[in-house]
Amino acid sequence: MTASPDRLRRALRQQLESLEAAGAKQLPRPSVAVLAHAEIEAPADLRCSIAPALEALRLEVAACTRCGELARTRTQTVFGVGDPGARLCFMGEAPGADEDRQGEPFVGRAGQLLNRIIEACRLRREDVYILNTIKCRPPNNRKPAPEEAANCRRFLDRQLELIKPQFICCLGAVAAQNLLGTTESIGRLRGRVHPFGDIKVVCTYHPAYLLRNPSAKKQTWDDMKLLMRQMGTPVD
Ligand code: URA
Ligand code: URA
């Protein structure tokens, strides 16, 4: 659907109001152009209604300074990528160096493996939504501190509220433990379906772990087959 000028005006007004509510005092010019463009380009009905709110949230994340060290050391925040109307979200840990540079999750070596996993599920990267537990790169790729995950949680929750995925695949212990609020190991969390509100969650190993431990790929493939059966699109 193409957005009418009226719809566009309404969407932009809503975005500006939510930015104002979030404490924004001014909006950089290019962002407005990007917003308008995103609204006109969005092809599906669903995307037309979600995309502006997601974009407003993305700008809110970009301005966040709650974690002092991360805000000082990041190149940029890494919000998420993919279809805002996706049934399936992949959730990682935190941006690495490549992601920090490019502003997109899972674009480095782990990301290439994730792309292959997604394709093995007979999906494309553009069909799913990919996001991280926290939106800033921790220096030296250290694990996100619990306080950092807590600071970022409202952004994650809001992102999931807008996208409303039916399924989430948690990649690695940080994503799984933070989303589900547990300290159980990834080895014990994988292989079954966990409820998260109305969302079905499947946990598996992080692709970076699989690069170091290729023999665990078999278990991740078992987890993907479980996920695809749950989604009604079995791959075995
Ligand atoms: N590892 C993650 O957990 N997320 C990314 O975006 C990249 C690598
Ligand atoms: N430990 C993690 O944090 N993630 C994995 O995927 C495996 C072990």
Image (cartoon, grey):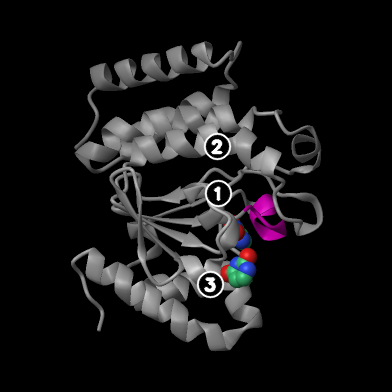
Secondary structure category for the residue under label 3? helix
The percent position of residue 80, horizontal first and vertical second, equals 50, 47
Q: Is residue 195 left or right of residue 45?
A: right
N-terminal of the two: label 3 or label 1? 1
Q: Residues within 10 Å of mark 2 (few under 14, many from 20)?
A: some
The yes-or-no answer for disc 3 within 8 Å of ligand 2 is: yes
Q: Is residue 102 magenta?
A: no
Q: Residue at x 62, y 37 (%)?
A: 150
Compared with 150, 16 (above or below) is above
Q: Secondary structure at mark 1?
A: helix
Percent x, y for residue 230? 24, 65
Residue at point 56% right, 64% down? 172
* Quarter of the image where one finds residue 231: bottom left
Quarter of the image containing the C terminus?
Answer: bottom left
Nearest to N terminus: mark 2 or mark 3 = 2
Q: Main secondary structure of the magenta part?
A: helix
| Image quarter in which the N terminus is found | top left
On the image, the x and y values in percent for residue 189 come to: 47, 65
Q: Which residue is mark 2?
A: 153
Q: Which one is closest to the eye, mark 2 or mark 1?
A: 1
Disc 2 + disc 1, Cβ < 8 Å: yes
**Which portion, as a residue range, is magenta?**
94-101
Q: Amino acid at mark 1?
A: Asn
**Alpha carbon separation for disc pair 2 and 3:** 24 Å
- Queried whether the magenta region covers residue 96, the answer comes back as yes
Total numbered labels: 3
Q: Give the residue number, with chain letter if any, for mark 3.
A: 187
Q: Please, what is the three-letter code of the amino acid marked with disc 2?
A: Arg
Kindly identify which residue carries mark 1.
178
Residue 193: horizontal and vertical position, in percent?
34, 62
| Secondary structure type for disc 2 | helix
